[in-house]
Amino acid sequence: MKRLSLVYPVITYRSKLKRNLGFVVTEDWIVGQLYTDNTGNKYLLAAPPENEEHQRFYDVSNLRQETIGVISPFKTNTDKPIFDGDIISVVAYNGVVNDTPQNVMGIDGESVMVEKERQISIPENAEITFSAEGIVRNYNGNFFFEYADFEKVSLGTATIPLYQFYTPDFVPIENHIIDIIGNIYDNPQLSQQILYYT
């Protein structure tokens, strides 16, 4: 058996498999790390989403090359990982967010501090300061948000660093709601709308 070694220990990739393979292929994405053997062949150690315990090595030649994307360090408000090629919605608003710890009565009658969940919906009467749907792009390891800037129609899309919506701990900034609404491979019409205002 060939000896395999991990190529990039901290990088996770996502891809779809080609059709007409010698094993069953679903529409689901596979997610894993890239390995190489001593002859230079590369493999993605991944598991189907419906059976995460059933990991296997997928030869890179069996992957749909156009769908291979790298994970970003950023997540949505509901902790979903964001990948290169995802289409996300970003909403920023002015309003009161109360996610400070609360006093809650414990089982033994003592007061216990409990973290309140992050806001994942816009409060009533909040003023929207920014709202856009855009595509996450990875350029040389840096992640950007590409969206249609309607104030600069002649320039088409605007691209800004994705980190501008996050704290240094990679948590969405307070008063920001970030959600994944698709990806450019499963939802090409949505990506066309974002890029070309159709």
Image (spheres, rainbow, N blue to C red):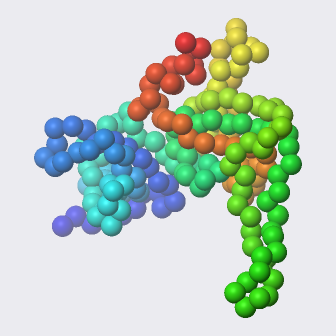
Taking the spot 61% from the left edge, 30% from the top edge, the residue there is: 134
Taking the spot 54% from the left edge, 19% from the top edge, the residue there is: 193
User: Would you place residue 140 above or below residue 48 in this image?
Assistant: above
Q: Left or right? Give the position of 80 relative to 12.
A: right
User: Would you place residue 195 above or below residue 43 in this image?
Assistant: above
Q: Left or right? Give the position of 91 relative to 136.
A: right
Q: Could you say where residue 131 lies in the image, as x and y percent from the top left?
A: 72, 30
Q: Look at the image and tell me in which quarter the C terminus lies.
A: top right
Q: Hey, which quadrant is residue 153 in on the image?
A: top right
Q: Left or right? Give the position of 148 relative to 188.
A: right
Residue 127 visible in the picture: yes
Residue 37 visible in the picture: no
Taking the spot 59% from the left edge, 55% from the top edge, the residue there is: 79
Taking the spot 18% from the left edge, 67% from the top edge, the residue there is: 1
Q: Please tell me which residue lies in front, 8 or 167.
A: 167
Q: Hey, which quadrant is residue 141 in on the image?
A: top right
Q: Residue furthest left?
A: 22
Q: Could you say where residue 38 lies in the image, as x and y percent from the top left?
A: 28, 59
Q: How many marks?
A: 0
Q: Could you say where residue 5 lies in the image, as x and y percent from the top left?
A: 36, 63
Q: Left or right? Give the position of 99 relative to 71.
A: right
Q: Residue furthest top?
A: 154
Q: Please tell me which residue lies in front, 60 or 177.
A: 177
Q: Please tell me which residue lies in front, 80 or 93.
A: 93
